[in-house]
Amino acid sequence: MKVLGIVGRNGAGKDSVLDFLKQQCGIAAVSSGDIVRDLARRENIKPTRNNLQQLAQKTMQMEGTDAIARRLIENIEMHAWPAVGVSGLRTADDIAVFRSHFGDNFKLAYVWVGDAERRFQRLRARGAPRDPKTLEAFVEQERSEEVQFEISAAIKQANVKIDNSGQPHELQQSIRKSPLWDWLDCGRVSHPPVDGK
């Protein structure tokens, strides 16, 4: 099984990359957010971004900094997917657990958009209730998440950088030109879409 981790800042388009690969290559897709939202449902916690961050932090404090990553791996191992994309990896510990478990069958892609205001506008267009309502709140949220998760340390471990600062067709072209396209055997084999849930 090939496992592609996706890392990036909020609003960078991590899910857009996975959606495209799911559609074009038939890979399954899972998210650390799915794990935390499931924990919130079990504990009857409203799934706001702040509540989910606190729950993730509490889980990592109680079970270890790699707790969410280990739960993701358990979920992945229950399936016989030829390839799966994983969104929401945040910490260097997450990456270390995946690299240790999957070895050379794990690659990490960093989805990059340098302009914070562009990423904020993309979140606003998405319209998820958990997203910040102002640019100032968005920037503060990023600072808070960097302190909590040290996302920049995970980003530094990426095998591939995907630029998503342009239009959707430019992102798709960037993905097709990346080494991931061949690694996932996209374009060589016709894959039916796989439901990752």
Image: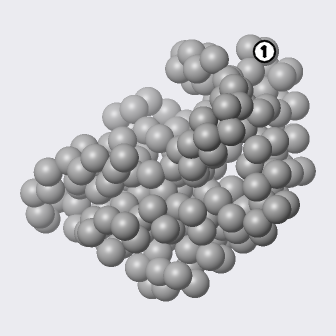
- Give the x, y percent position of residue 106: 47, 75
- Give the x, y percent position of residue 104: 45, 84
Residue at image location 78% in from the left, 27% down from the top = 138
Residue at image location 33% in from the left, 75% down from the top = 1
What residue occupies the far front of the structure in this picture? 43
- Tell me which amino acid carries mark 1: Thr
- Give the x, y percent position of residue 179: 38, 68
Above or below, 44 relative to 156:
above
Front residue (pair 141, 162): 141
Above or below, 87 relative to 160:
above
Residue at image location 28% in from the left, 47% down from the top = 195
Mark 1 highlights which residue? 134
In the rendered image, which quarter is residue 33 located in?
top right
Would you say 142 lies left or right of 18 here?
right
In the rendered image, which quarter is residue 66 located in?
bottom right
Front residue (pair 139, 114): 139
Residue at image location 82% in from the left, 62% down from the top = 62
| Neighbours of disc 1 within 10 Å: few (<14), some (14-19), many (20+) | few
Color theme of the render: one colour
Q: Is residue 136 visible?
A: yes
Front residue (pair 62, 175): 62
Q: Is residue 116 visible?
A: no
